[in-house]
Image (cartoon, rainbow, N blue to C red):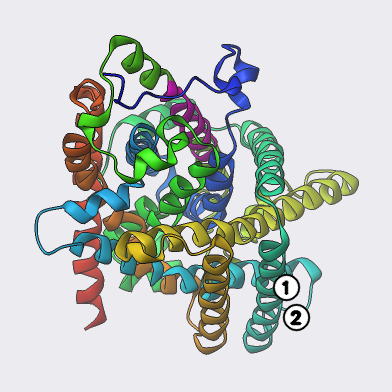
Amino acid sequence: MSNLIKYPPLSDELQPKSFSGFLKIFGAGAIMASVTLGSGETIFASRGGAIFGYTILWCFVLGTIMKGFQVYSGARFITLTGMHPLESWRELPGPKGWFVWFIAIMTILWMPLWLGAGLPKMLGDFTNWVVGYPDMANADQFNFFGKVWATIFVVVSIIFTWFQSYKFLEKFQTILISLLLLCMTIAAVASSPELMKIITGSFIPSVPVYQDWVLEKYPLFQNRHAWIEMAVYLGMIGGGSQDYLGYIGLLRNKKWGMMEHEVASKNFSPEAICTSEENITLARRWLRAPLIDITISFFCVLAFTYMFIILGAAVLHPNMQIPTGFELLTVQLGYLVNSDQPAILQTFLSFIYKTGIFFTFFGTIFGAYELYSWSTRECVIAAMPRFKDVPMKKFRLATILWCGGGGLILLWTLDKNPVVLITPGALVGSALTCGLWCFAMLYSDKIHIPKALQMGMPLKVGVFISGLVLTVVPIIGLVIYVQNLF
C-alpha cells in the first residue's frame, strides 16, 4: 500500500469555499473563453438571431452544454491521471496511434485558416469601417485595406505571443471578459426582448428554415442550406478541438491533482493509484478545480451567446438585416445606437460598441497563438513521444510560423467571404472532432482510471449524447456541403 500513488494535498486556491475563492481558480478557462468569443458569439450568434429569430436559441444552448461536457471530460482525465487525453488515445483499438494522428492533423490543419483569412480578416474589415476609409462601396479597395489591417494585427499578436507571460495573458483576458459581458448584458436588456420566445426558443428544438425575405434579400443563402448554417453554429459556439486540446495542455501550469506527480504520470496505470477512501475523496475534491474553471468559462460563453442572439432577434431580425460580407460586425452597432438618441449618447455608445468588439476580436487572435501553441505541442508529443522534452518555446515558434506565415499566405491569396472560408473548418475541426473526442474519452475513462474514480452515469450519458450530436450533425452538414460544391 505504501508504494501506491496518492494525490497531493489540495492547493490553497481550493481550500476556501467562498465564491470569491472559487474565482481565483478561473484562469486557463478565461483564455479559452476569450479565444472562442470572437466569431462564434459576436458574429454567428448575431447572425443566427437575425436569420432565425429566437427559434435558434436551442442550438446554441445545446452546443454550449455539450462542449462543456466534452471539455470537462478531458480536464477531468488529466487531473486524475496527469496524462493529456491525446496520450491515452494512442491505445485505442486499431493501428497504433491512428486516432491521435487523425485528431492532430484535423486540428493543426485548420489553424492558419482561423488566424489568417478568418478572424484577422474580419477584424481588418471592421477596422476599415471604424476609421471610415475606404468606403464600403469600393469593394476592391475595402478588401485590400482590410487585408492590410489584418496583417498588422497578425504581426502584433505574434510579437505579444513571443514576449508575453502566461500570468499576464490570464489576467488580461479575465478583465476583458468581465467588461464585455457587462456591456452586452445592458444592451440586451435595453432591447426589450420577448421573454416567452426566449424560453421556448431555448428549450424547444425546431428545424432551421429560411424565411422568404432571407432568400430574396440575401441570394447567397440560396446556395447555403439551412442545415449547414446551423451545423456551423454548433461548431463555432464555444470553440473547437484546436482550442480545447491547448486548454487542457495549459492546465499543466496549474498542477492540479496528478499533474503534480510528473514522474508518476509518465508511467501511470490505474493499479498504481491508492484506492483508500481518503485518497479517493481527495481526488474528487481536486476535480472541483477543472469543474469550476470550465463552468465559469462556458457560463461566460453562454451569456455572451444569449446576449448576441437576443440582440440579433430583437434588433436585426425585424429589420431584415443579416451580418454578411463586409458587414459581419457593422450592422450590430444598432444594438446600442439608434437615431432617437441624443447625439452625445450615440457617440458614447458607438465608442463602447466599437471598442468592445475590437478588443474582443483582438483578444481572440492574441490568445489563440498561445492556446494553439499548446495544442500543437500536445498533438505532436502524443503522436511522436520522442519530442516530449522539446522546450515549449520551440513549439511556440513552430506555431507562430505555421499559423502566422500560413495565415498571411491564405489572407492574401483567398478573396472569398470569411464565413465561406471557415465553414469546412467549423464543420470538421470545431464540431466533428469534438464529437469523436467524446467517444474516445469514454474509452479512456474505462481503461485508464480506477473504477472508484470513473465517470458517474449522468456524466457518461452527457458525454455520450454530446458525442452523438457533435458527430452526426456535422457529418450531415459536410455531406450537404460537398454536394453543393458540384
Range drawn in magenta: 286-301
Indicate the secondary structure of the residue bearing disc 2.
loop
Within 10 Å of disc 1 (Cα), the crowding (few <14, some 14-19, many 20+) is many
Which residue has dot 2 on it? 134
Which residue has dot 1 on it? 128
State the predominant SS element of the stretch in magenta.
Answer: helix
Q: Residue furthest left?
A: 94
Which quadrant of the figure has residue 56?
A: top left
Q: CA distance from mark 2 to mark 1?
A: 7 Å
Question: Image point 44% across, 28% down: which residue?
Answer: 291
Q: What is the count of numbered marks?
A: 2
Q: Nearer the viewer, residue 443 or 366?
A: 443
Q: Quadrant of the N terminus?
A: top left
Give residue 112's position: percent from left, percent from top.
49, 73
Indicate the secondary structure of the residue bearing disc 1.
helix
Magenta-span inclusion, residue 296: yes
Q: Nearer the viewer, residue 229 or 245?
A: 245
Q: Nearer the viewer, residue 212 or 383?
A: 383
| In the depicted structure, whether residue 304 falls above or below residue 427 | above
Q: Amino acid at mark 2?
A: Pro
Which quadrant of the figure has residue 396?
A: bottom right
Give residue 443's position: percent from left, percent from top.
17, 42
Q: Amino acid at mark 1?
A: Asn
Residues under numbered marks 2 and 1 in contact, where contact means CB atoms less than 8 Å apart:
yes
| In the depicted structure, whether residue 5 falls above or below residue 427 | above
Question: Image point 46% across, 24% down: which residue?
Answer: 8
The answer to whether residue 449 shows anywhere in this view is: yes
Give residue 287's position: percent from left, percent from top.
41, 25
Within 10 Å of disc 2 (Cα), the crowding (few <14, some 14-19, many 20+) is some
